[in-house]
Image: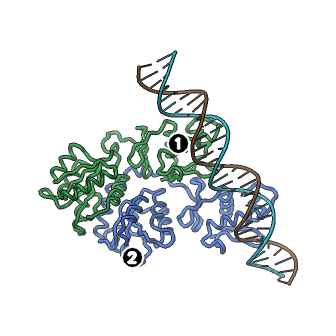
Chain colours: A green, B blue, C brown, D cyan
Amino acid sequence: MTAVLVIEDDDRIRLALLLALEDEGYDALGAATAEEGLRAQRHHPADYVLVDLMLPGLDGFECIRQLRRDDDVPIVVVSARDETDDIVAALEAGADDYVVKPVAIRELTARLRALRRRARPLAAVSTPDPVPAVAFGELEISPEAGEVRRAGQQVTVTRTEFRLLCELAEHAGRVLSRQQLLQRVWGYDSGDERLVDVHVGRLRQKIEPDPANPRHLVTLRGLGYKLQR
Amino acid sequence: MTAVLVIEDDDRIRLALLLALEDEGYDALGAATAEEGLRAQRHHPADYVLVDLMLPGLDGFECIRQLRRDDDVPIVVVSARDETDDIVAALEAGADDYVVKPVAIRELTARLRALRRRARPLAAVSTPDPVPAVAFGELEISPEAGEVRRAGQQVTVTRTEFRLLCELAEHAGRVLSRQQLLQRVWGYDSGDERLVDVHVGRLRQKIEPDPANPRHLVTLRGLGYKLQR
DNA sequence: GGGTCTATGACAGTTGTGTGACAAAACTGC
DNA sequence: GCAGTTTTGTCACACAACTGTCATAGACCC
């Protein structure tokens, strides 16, 4: 599950945020001070950090700088102050986004998802030999690791589906005919083209937000299939 | 230099943004409509795109979706509307950030810099080779991608329409008789010439701004059809 | 104004695509 | 090897999209 750390000294606001985030399906954790938050993040790294600016002791700016020193986690400032100076300073300190309280939980989670799309896949940073991942907006394909993620969520695809997806990804934006796919994915020189349809259908069930209206794995009638962002 | 594309229909706001961005050392380019912006980005990709939501013709949301389809460029919405629904919809459509007008230029550039930190180094790997397209004035025909775009906006044409269009484009500026088209597009040595009319009509519905007064796909009475700029 | 040419809406036949059901094949743990 | 599970390929059918024909109305030319 996706974990969020909320660093906010006001108990009521922190609690409200935590509850709202949990309602949205996040695993939310709170900290009342910067020090506490930094410690928590060091020991149990969350996937996102929300941080207030006005904190007792170490303030938000410093908290962001310290977080950034050894963590690439997306940081969103949630502050009551709507001053350009604060916004600029927070972003310069290393924050990724800045929203002004009170903020609708839907906006907040939408911003988290937007950040998720940009967040570096962990592997690319921490693995000495980076896995050549391919990203298509919400879709991430790691051919080496043999895994596929949609909006950060890992989805399990079968080997055939994976090969099919890779083949399409390799020629992203271009149409591949059913014949070409049969050839490249299955190694068949001829065969029933319906086979491709079926596997495309199954793949859509797994990687499309709305499989009935595919946005990435699209059909080009009479031509074949194409993968696009 | 870092290039920014500003898609905003209000001339004064666009100009103000462009000047301010240039002051900050960016190479700023403006577009008054989504269509114009999409075309600009396709031909001269900028490093960032700022886009308004309320645009004449194609609106901002659709513009974002189309940009995202084959571009990983950071997109920031600059809108007068401060509604949660708009913010969520824009972010879901693929925007990376959303700021409310009027916005301090310092905040905007700070947000751009924050986005740059996140800009996917993977982009180079994941961005597919640009799909070759034949440009024809406002029209772009791309056999590889199996698509046709008018003013940057994708239009779906059927296979027959596509072949017909290609045939006309190949002999752009010259008249092709119905017989010639029947021969080349359909492979018929003889047949009802009305068939060509019908398909030309359907094609016009899709690619002409005003299908009743065709400007590109014109009739030459008694001779045939011609594609012109 | 009459003849010719063109545009277009309606329609039915055809083709292409999506999908659920099912059985064969491959894999798994024992 | 065996029983249970997952994956794969085949098939049939329903549905959607496309195509070509036709009829009608309108545009154009002399």
Residue B63 x/y as whole percent: 47, 64
| SS type, badge 1 | helix
**B119 versus B229 height, above or below:** above
Residue under the point 70% across and 65% down:
B200
Please, which chain is the residue tagged with disc 2 on? Answer: B
Q: Which residue is mark 1?
A: A202
Q: What is the number of the mark on residue B15?
A: 2
Give a yes or no on whether discs 1 and 2 share a subunit.
no
Q: Residues within 10 Å of mark 1 (few under 14, many from 20)?
A: some
**B35 versus A161 height, above or below:** below
Residue A18 x/y as whole percent: 26, 53
Residue B18 visible in image: yes
> Quick check: marks 1 and 2 in contact, CB under 8 Å?
no
Residue A87 placement, left or right of C14: left
Q: What is the number of the mark on residue B97?
A: none
Residue A157 placement, left or right of A88: right
**C3 versus A7 height, above or below:** below
Q: Which quarter of the figure is the N terminus of chain B placed in? A: bottom left
Residue type, mark 1 in image: Arg
Residue type, mark 2 in image: Leu
Residue B212 placement, left or right of A211: right
Q: Nearer the viewer, residue D10 or B10?
A: D10
Residue A76 x/y as whole percent: 27, 57
Observer-side mark, 1 or 2, equals 1
Q: Which quarter of the figure is the C terminus of chain B placed in? A: bottom right
Residue under the point 19% across and 49% down:
A38
Residue under the point 53% across and 53% down:
A213
